[in-house]
Each structure stands twice: as structure tokens, then as C-alpha cells.
Image (cartoon, helix red, strand yellow):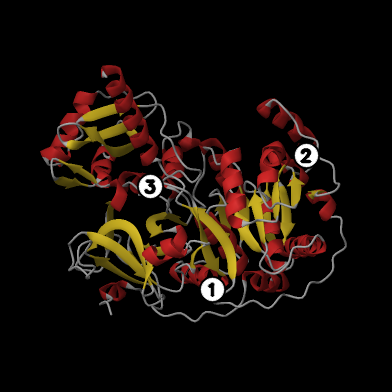
Amino acid sequence: MSNKRWLKHYPEEISPKLHYEEKSLQQMLKETAENFPEKKAIHFNGKELTYRELYASALKFARYLQKIGIGKGDRVAIMLPNTPQAIISFYGILLAGGIVVQTNPMYTEREIAFQMKDSGAKAIVALEILYPRIMKVKQETDLEHIIITAIKDYLPFPKNIIYPFIQKKQYGFSVKVEHAGDTHLFSKVMEEPILDNPILKVDFHEDVAILQYTGGTTGFPKGVMLTHRNLVCNTRMCVEWMYRLKEGKEVILGALPLFHVYGMTTVMILSIMQGFKVVLIPKPTPDVLLKTIQSQKPTVFPGAPTMYIGLINHPDIEKYDLSSIDSCISGSAPLPVEVQHTFEKLTGGKLVEGYGLTETSPVTHANLLWDGERIKGSIGIPWPDTDAEIRSLDTDEPLPPGEVGELVIRGPQVMKGYWNRPEETEQTLKDGWLYTGDMGYMDEEGYFYIVDRKKDMIIASGFNIYPREIEEVLYEHPAVQEVVVAGVPDPYRGETVKAYIVLKEGVKATEEELDEFARKHLAAYKVPKIYEFRDELPKTTVGKILRRQLVEEEKKKLKQVEDQKA
């Protein structure tokens, strides 16, 4: 049993052990709709739905799914951006007894085919613009039904009339879909009569609610099985951690994609558990975020570092009132300290770094928002009912404070396992502990730090080098907007350190300047040997920089050079 030295930092408002009501996710929507029927649940580009309307729509969708043959345990994919339909579909699938398969709407045909085949999804809900993509791969999959919706379906007048013309101009084509055969229109489904649906009995501990795919940047994606218990417990922990939030009162900025586990839990499920209003943003550009914050006055803004970076570097930031923002937890990638400080000065709110994985529903650690010390560069301390250790890669024994090893986690938010992958489940889950693949350490006070992914560690001339440490230093340079550091092949050192830099608009910096700056703060062997300036860096939909993609580019370049020599 680990020594939970972090508990001494808990303010009295946070209990280290929580009581979890064994209620399914769909039961929570039903209860919130009963408790706050006329409360606004969703705001989407000027259109709003109350909790009564949201629940009624989810019931209609559930009935329709049952009518076309979706039953207990059947997988149904949602391939939508942040729209009311995404939330209606999510709860409708659960009400029908199905399992939600979250699918990124930016996926290519190959990625769609893989995920549909792997999950065995029987139906998919998608935008009409994605219909041709799905139809090209349908024959390779078990898909029996395609349910099609459009952004305009939930836009107010006259935006619903204008939007199709904007969309056609943007994509260069438009798609007409008929409500016939195995193709169904979401708008027609919503014309069905409202019939109360008995909430199906759910095994809170064992029944899978979600298949959330992860690990696509290295190898094939794996379907993480998250149960009702996993997701309810993690959301309940979030409520405890953010104890100043008032039930039924807050407005959450829904900028994180709901098809990603972080947005799903900290935006959608949290809001529905607590009766908050969600302001949905399908494309969170800095312009859209600033205008939305000013007009909708959100109080809570869960985000990713790239979102906060985009805002603080916006040339017109001073023209906007961001003072409604009270609390933000940043996740999905390391939060640079400079970004945290600047954002807090601009908004007057609190921004802290948290940590989690898809396999943990997702949050396991965070810094304290209000009462207590926030430690520079730390992911914070474990959440209630969450245990964490740093273990040796060689002996698998817990390491003392200050020593770097692999972070392992145990708690009710830890996944059931990987879908149809028992061997990979066994490698990751051992005796109830989840092996994260992240390298880190715990200090004497019980605060945790991530130094890097096990796979991202650079070994140059025998030295272990962690990219995050170098990135933190370079972020302090006034010209740097974004940076990622990677190990690239080197014939002499094995690997060498390369920094990819995006400079702030209108600001110049040379390789020599950055090198001089880095040498003041880093041991010589950690200083990047190569700098590459770019207009942008490759990212996932939640703003996580794709380091591996850059490494693969370098390997291809090296191979081309070697082939030319040969």
C-alpha cells in the first residue's frame, strides 16, 4: 500500500474518499431533466435546448434505434463535431441499451473502416458531408444503418437557411441524402412521438458504456472499454475537486471535442450530472472562442494548452471581456508555465494543469484550483480514491521521492480493458494497477511530475533526455509561441535533440539566439543541436502535438539521403 503523502494538501472541502451512487449515465440525464426541466442545457450558435427537450430528444432517438434493431450491447458510432445531435445521440444510444463508439469526424476512409470493423458497430450517426466517405467503406464493415444529420438541423432561423450555402462554398460540394432503406435522417427521427422509455437495468460495475479509441499515433488504435462506473466515478471526482461550482448554475465552454474522452467527461457528462449549461463550439478557433466568451459568459473552460496559447497571442485579446471565466483545468498535453500565468492575468480566473489518459476516463491528477499551493511544472496530486506510484522500469518496485520511473495508477476510473485485446490488456493492467507508459517522479510533498512518455525519451550518447524539460525552457523565450522537441536519428550520438519552433506573429528569432538562451538553462547534452522553424505543428483534434509524426518525417528524410548515397 502506497503512502498517500499528498492527502495532507487536500483542503477540507475535498474528501479523499467519495460515495458513488450506482446510477447509469442515462439515469443521470433523466434525473437532471426532472430536477431542472426548464434550465437551458445546450447553447449552439444561438439555438438553445432545455433539459426537458434534451431528454425528450434522447428518448425519441433511443426508441428509433430499438425500432431498427439496436439492442443491449450493440455498438453504435457517433461521428459528429460538437453539436446538439452529438449529445442527443450519446444518451439515446445508452437509453437504447447500446454502447457508444466515439469516432473522430476528421477520420479518413481507412481509419473509419478500421474502427467500424474493430468495434463491430451496427449503426453510425454522422454529418451529411461525411456520408460519401462512410459509403465507400460500408461493405467492409458490419454497419447496417447510417443516420445522417446536418449542422443546419439545430441552427436558428435564418442561420439554418444560409449555412448550407456556406458549407457548399467551404467544401466545394453538397450532399443530398434520402430517408429510405438503411439510411435515416436525424430530422425525421426527431418527428417521432415522445414515448417514455423505461431505463434499462445496467450493471454499473461491468456494463461498458463507451468504446473510446486510443493509441492511433503509434500502431493500431485500441478500443478502451469504459464502464458506467468508470465515467460516473471520474465525473463525481471532478465535482469534488471543483467544489466551488454550483449545481444548476454554471456555464461550461464546450470547446474540447466531445468525441475525445476529455471533452466527453469534463464538458458533457459533468454538465449533465450537475445541470450546467454547455456552450457548444464545433471549431474552436481563437476568434470564435473570444467572441463566445464575451457573449455567453462561460464560467468554466476545460481546455488544451493550444487553445490557451491561441487566445493569449491573439492580436485583439484586449478588446474582449474574459472576466466571466472562473476556473479552467488544462489537459491532453503539458501546460507551459508562461501560458498559465499570462492566461490568469488576462481573465482573473484560475488555470491549472491536470493529467489523465483515455484508459482512466480520463483524469487522475490535478493541481488545486483555489485553496492550496500550485507547484510549477507539476501535474498536481491524485484525485480522491486514486492511488499512484512511481515504479522502477527494471524491478517494478516503487521508487523513493525524486527518482524517475513509470507512473502507475489505481482507482475506480481505470478502464475495464481493451476491446478484444486480452494480451494488451494484460500488459497494461496488472493487479489492478494501470501502467501508463509515462515517465515521472513524485517529490517529498506528494506532488507528481511527468518528464515524458516512455517512448519519447531521447537517448543521446548514453544520456537520458526528456523533451518536456527542454520545451519548458524554450517556452520561456519571448519569441516562441509553440515548441516541440524530439529525438531524431544521429549516426554519432544514436539520437540527437531537435526543436521544432513556431514563432509569435511578427516576432523574429534566430537559431543562434535560441541556442544561447537554451545554454543558460540546460546542461550542454540537453541543448538542441538542430532547430527548425515552422508555420504550424501537426496536432490531434484536441491540440496534442504529434511528436511521433515529426520523428517519422525525420526517419524518411534520412532514408532518402542513404538511398541516394547507395
Q: Earlier in the sequence, mark 1 or mark 2?
A: 2
Q: Which residue: 71% across, 75% down?
A: 200
Specify whether 10 is left or right of 65: left
* Residue 322 visible in this rendered orientation of the protein: yes
- The image shows a total of numbered marks equal to 3
Labels 1, 2: front one: 1
Between 194 and 213, which is closer to the camera in this rendering? 213
| Pointer 1 with pointer 2, Cβ within 8 A | no
Residue 290 tag number: none
Amino acid, disc 1? Arg
Q: In which quadrant will I find the C terminus?
A: top left
- Which label is found at residue 160? 2
Determine whether, in the image, residue 227 is placed left or right of residue 237. Answer: right
Q: Which residue is mark 3?
A: 345
Q: Position of residue 153 (x, y in %)?
A: 77, 45
Tell me the SS state at disc 3. Answer: helix
